[in-house]
Amino acid sequence: MHYAPEQSQTEICPNCASPNFENVDLCRACGAPLTSHAATDPLRSLFAEGFALRQATSNPRKLIVVIGMWLWLGPVIVMLLFAIVGAAVFVVVERPQPSDTFLTNVFGVLLSALFLLLLGTILYKTTKNYLASRKASATCPPAADKRPRPLT
Ligand SMILES: [Zn+2]
């Protein structure tokens, strides 16, 4: 941690190790958010999480990242599925008249479906890229290649 007031290139990028000026938010070499600033600004930390998520999605190196992603997104996906199925059952069984509430529900279902698609894509890409990176590195023992998807 550096608290010197003068501008010096002491902010080392955690992603590419390039030196940056202390008061910059993003690495000028690779665009990664510099964490000491990201931690103080909620918007920046959100962006930092997004960056970490992109990194993890496109290049997951560790199994724990993939497992963490499943543990994090799995319950959300299940909840969204239940919400969508529940709303669909409600529409089929109750046959509500089109009204403001009805339209709000339809909008909510569409939004949930969109969110579900997004999260599903993130999980799918992460898992796929992880398995691909495992196949690429022959040094890793093929222990847990055929993991069952913890989503039923
Ligand atoms: Zn960088």
Image (cartoon, grey):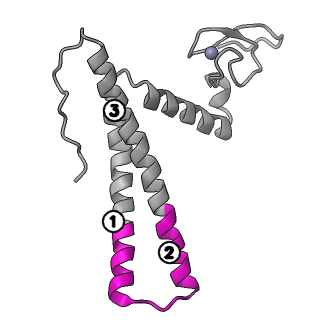
**Mark seen at residue 91:** none
- Give the residue at x 38% y 33%: 126
* Disc 1, SS: helix
Label 3 Cα crowd, 10 Å radius (few <14 / some 14-19 / many 20+): some
Residue 149's x, y, as percent? 23, 43
* Disc 3, SS: helix
- Give the residue at x 75% y 15%: 22
- Residue 92 location, quadrant: bottom left
The correct choice, above or below, for 36 with respect to 148 in the image is above
Q: Nearer the viewer, residue 125 or 53?
A: 125
- Give the residue at x 48% y 92%: 97
Range of the magenta residues? 84-111
Pick out the residue farthest to the bottom. 97
Under mark 3, the amino acid is Lys
> Which residue position is annotated with label 3?
128
Q: Could you tell which of marks 2 and 1 lies nearer the N-terminus?
A: 1
Under mark 2, the amino acid is Val
* Disc 2, SS: helix
Viewer-nearest of labels 2 and 1?
2
Residue 100's x, y, as percent? 58, 84
Q: Could you tell which of marks 1 and 3 lies nearer the N-terminus?
A: 1
Separation (CA) of disc 2 from disc 1:
15 Å
Separation (CA) of disc 2 from disc 3:
32 Å
> Which residue position is annotated with label 1?
82
- Quarter of the image where ligand 1 sits: top right
Task: Indicate yes or no whether the magenta region holds residue 99.
Answer: yes
- Give the residue at x 39% y 47%: 120
> Which residue position is annotated with label 2?
106
